[in-house]
Image (cartoon, rainbow, N blue to C red):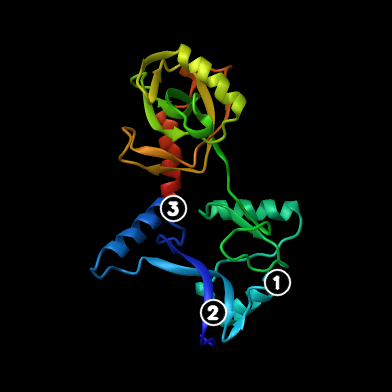
Amino acid sequence: MPAHTVVLDGEAMGLDEAGRPWAFQKTSSRAARRRSSSEAQPAELRPFFFDLLHLDGADLIDAPARERWAALTAALPADLLVTRTEISGVAAAERAFAAAVDAGQEGLVIKSLDAPYDVGRRGAAWVKVKPRHTLDLVVLAAEWGHGRRRGWLSNLHLGARDPETGEFVMLGKTFKGLTDEMLRWQTERLRALAVEQDDWVVAVRPELVVEIAFDGVQTSPRYPGGVALRFARVLRYREDKTAAEADTINDVRAIHTGRVAGG
């Protein structure tokens, strides 16, 4: 490496034998295991760098991105760098996005070539773009809110239908995406469907279907189905659907299996 003193920005990633990235959960759990163990372990995680903040006594934070990245390319071997493509126009961006997802990546990070480096925050000069998955799930229970949501049923317990038993398998909870209007509406509806409640949780008849967006499915020993949603948030209630028409646990597992197979 021609540089002597550098400050870099990057991340560690695990790759499978085909060069596709591991799922986020596998990478993060493997990193945590390495930190907590004093035993020697194989170097399964590799560093990849995407920005250069300081080079041999020169601070580059205020330099435009194109200059920082040119210096980064000159300073480090190619196998330590994140793949970068300069594009112009929506069509080119869509092609790059599709190629990244097909390669097993979670999406793209789109950055301005002229922007300085924003220390400690993402800033407006770059945006992360991921494919949005959605499922129609059933509300199994809800927790009373606190703070400004006090008095409303807020945190939803979400379940997928098990086609073999007809029961519902819990996948996690979310209060993200709920507007005040939705909170008022669901509090009234869920109280009417209540079958059991205590000071914190109201269990309901599994009748309300809600459309949920999420970033992925991960293995979870916490829930009986063995999987959970990542970054789930509410899009809308599906009053046009019955619980029998909700997505199944098999649908959720298929998404998870596809992601694991892809890395």
Q: What residue type is labelled 3?
A: Phe
Q: Which amino acid does label 1 sit on?
A: Pro
Residue drawn 57% across the image and 41% down it: 132
Of the pair 199 and 103, the residue shown nearer to us:
199
Residue drawn 23% across the image and 68% down it: 39
Mark 3 / mark 1, whichever is N-terminal: 3
Mark carried by residue 76: 2
Q: Position of residue 129 (x, y in %)?
A: 61, 50
For disc 1, the marked residue is 64
SS assignment at label 2:
loop
Q: Which amino acid does label 2 sit on?
A: Leu
Q: Position of residue 238 (x, y in %)?
A: 57, 21
SS assignment at label 1:
loop
Mark carried by residue 24: 3
Left of 9 or right of it: where is 219? left
Q: Can residue 238 be seen in this view?
A: no
Label count reads: 3
**Could you give the CA–CA distance between mark 1 and mark 2, rounded to whole angstroms?**
19 Å
Residue drawn 30% across the image and 40% down it: 221
Of the pair 261 and 62, the residue shown nearer to us:
62
Residue drawn 76% across the image and 55% down it: 89
